[in-house]
Each structure stands twice: as structure tokens, then as C-alpha cells.
Image: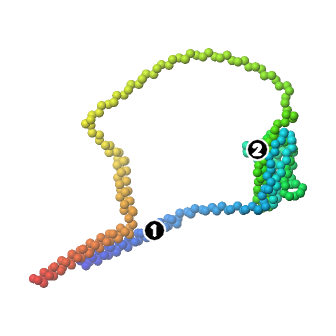
């Protein structure tokens, strides 16, 4: 009896040690898997450098209405800037030109852009002989400071009206030849279409009231999938229990069994001893 109890206690100790070892091994694997995952690269967007307080547009250019071939002026004021570039954009926004490219884009136009004589930061742009094709274009003043930062004014729109005094109207306009009106074609009489033949109505089949419908057990693949799902559910029940708790439960059952067996053995020996003493 002594050897049986010793063997049972040794078996419980081995099971508890195995559960502890298995639990620590799982934790190490999870930590190593977390450590091996690539870390996401954090992209830090640098904050833009704030503009100097004096580097701003104090006067916005104003829109101009003019006749074709006339002269228009645009003025803008900015502080603490180095250079100024006038930007022209088409009515649909698809074309952007600098003021140095206007004379080449619009032949006959004369453009002059410069800083005013008093040196207070005023920019003046003069456009002579404005063509009608410049109607709807927008103008902005773009300033750049010594640090390379830019600030842009609000847009100003150029509206050009056609001047009839310089319009090229031809004097020998040919008279259009009248086109004869075609006679209407005869409308053909509509041919009556045959009426469709109605389809026969299907008659319902007579079914026996005493017939018993047998449920379809399903295909072999459905039965195998159901068995696999049952096994998966059974495995998930035990996989949710930690190995340490499962091992402790088994060890507790074994110890309880050993205790009951030891108690029964003591009672049996005590009865045997009393029996010998009495007889």
C-alpha cells in the first residue's frame, strides 16, 4: 500500500510539472511571435514653418472691365518680399502662365510689371492692347521672400467687351441659296399583327394524402462537414481550458482517490486488529 501511494504522489508531481512547463512554453511562443511581427513605420509630417508677420498681402488686385484693344492696370501690395510674379490662369483653369509668357501667348499684347518708384512694396502691372481672347482670364500676384516661402493674392478677373469700331465685319456676305423643302413620304399602312395564342394552363398534379415525405439526409460531403464541425466544437471546449487548470484537476482527483483508499485500508486494518485481540 505504501508503494502505491508513493507512486501516485510521484505521478501527480510529474503531471503538475508538465502542465507548468507546457504553459510557460506557450507563453514564450506567443511573445516570440509578437516580437517577430514587423513594426509599422511611423511617418512624422514636419509642421510647416510659420510665415513672418509682415510677409502678407495688404492690397489685393481688383478686377478690370475694358473694351478690346484698351489698356488695363493691376496693383498689389505686400510686405517683406523679394520677388513678385503675376500668374495668369485660363477661365477653365487648365492653363497657367507667368506674366513673362503673356506676350508670346497673346500676340500684339504689351505687358509691363515692376515695383513702383517709391519702394513701398507696391507692384504695378500694365497690359496694353488687350485682346478679346483674354476675356475671363484671372490674375494673381505671387510673392516670394528670402526664405523661399510664397504667398499669393486673391484672383482678379479680366472682362473684355467686343468693340464694334475695331471689329472685322466682312462687306461681301454671300446670300445663302434656299434649300428646297422635301416632300413628305407616303406613310405605309400598318399591317395587323396576329394575336398571340394563349399558352395552356398547367394542371396541378394529384398527390396522395397518405404519402410520407422522407427527409433528404444530404450528400456524403455534407455529412462529413457536419462530423468535422462536431469534432471542432468538442476540441474548442477543451482548448478553452488552460493546461495548468486541467492538470491540477486531474491531480486533485488522484489525491482524492488515494485518500479514500488510504482511509478504507486503515479501517480494514483496525477491524482486523480488534478481531485478533478479542479472539
Q: Is residue 19 above or below residue 61?
A: below
| Residue at figure coordinates x 67%, y 62% from the top left | 46
- Where in the figure is residue 3, as x and y percent of width and height? 26, 77
Which residue is located at x 33 percent, y 30 percent?
Answer: 204
When asked about the image quadrant of residue 253, the answer is: bottom left
| Mark 1 lies on residue | 27
Q: In this picture, is 194 found above or below 89?
A: above
Q: Residues within 10 Å of mark 2 (few under 14, many from 20)?
A: some
Q: Which of the pair 84/102 is nearer the observer?
A: 84
Picture coordinates of residue 30, whole percent (x, y): 47, 66
Q: Residue at x 60, y 62 (%)?
A: 41
Q: Which mark is residue 90?
A: 2
- Indicate how the structure is coloured in the image: rainbow
Q: Is residue 33 left or right of residue 249?
A: right
Q: Secondary structure at mark 2?
A: loop
Image quadrant occupied by the N terminus: bottom left
Residue 115: in sight, yes or no? yes
Amino acid at each position: 500500500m505504501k508503494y502505491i501511494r508513493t507512486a501516485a504522489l510521484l505521478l501527480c508531481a510529474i503531471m503538475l510539472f508538465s502542465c507548468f512547463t507546457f504553459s510557460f512554453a506557450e507563453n514564450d511562443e506567443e511573445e516570440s511571435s509578437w516580437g517577430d511581427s514587423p513594426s509599422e513605420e511611423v511617418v512624422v509630417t514636419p509642421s510647416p514653418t510659420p510665415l513672418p508677420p509682415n510677409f502678407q498681402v495688404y492690397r489685393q488686385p481688383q478686377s478690370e472691365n475694358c473694351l478690346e484693344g484698351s489698356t488695363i492696370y493691376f496693383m498689389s501690395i505686400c510686405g517683406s518680399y523679394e520677388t513678385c510674379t503675376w500668374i495668369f490662369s485660363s477661365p477653365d483653369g487648365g492653363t497657367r502662365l507667368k506674366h513673362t509668357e503673356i506676350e508670346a501667348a497673346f500676340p500684339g499684347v504689351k505687358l509691363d510689371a515692376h515695383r513702383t518708384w517709391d519702394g513701398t512694396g507696391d507692384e504695378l502691372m500694365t497690359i496694353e492692347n488687350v485682346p478679346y481672347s483674354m476675356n475671363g482670364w484671372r490674375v494673381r500676384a505671387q510673392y516670394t521672400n528670402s526664405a523661399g516661402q510664397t504667398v499669393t493674392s486673391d484672383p482678379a478677373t479680366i472682362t473684355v467687351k467686343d468693340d464694334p469700331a475695331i471689329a472685322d465685319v466682312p462687306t461681301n456676305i454671300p446670300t445663302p441659296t434656299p434649300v428646297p423643302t422635301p416632300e413628305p413620304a407616303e406613310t405605309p399602312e400598318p399591317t395587323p399583327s396576329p394575336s398571340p395564342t394563349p399558352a395552356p394552363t398547367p394542371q396541378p398534379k394529384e398527390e396522395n394524402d397518405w404519402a410520407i415525405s422522407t427527409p433528404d439526409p444530404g450528400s456524403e460531403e455534407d455529412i462529413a462537414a457536419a462530423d468535422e464541425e462536431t469534432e471542432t466544437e468538442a476540441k474548442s471546449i477543451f482548448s478553452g481550458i488552460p493546461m495548468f487548470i486541467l492538470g491540477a484537476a486531474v491531480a486533485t482527483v488522484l489525491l482524492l482517490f488515494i485518500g479514500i483508499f488510504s482511509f478504507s485500508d486503515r479501517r480494514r486494518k483496525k477491524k482486523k486488529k480488534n478481531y485478533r485481540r478479542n479472539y
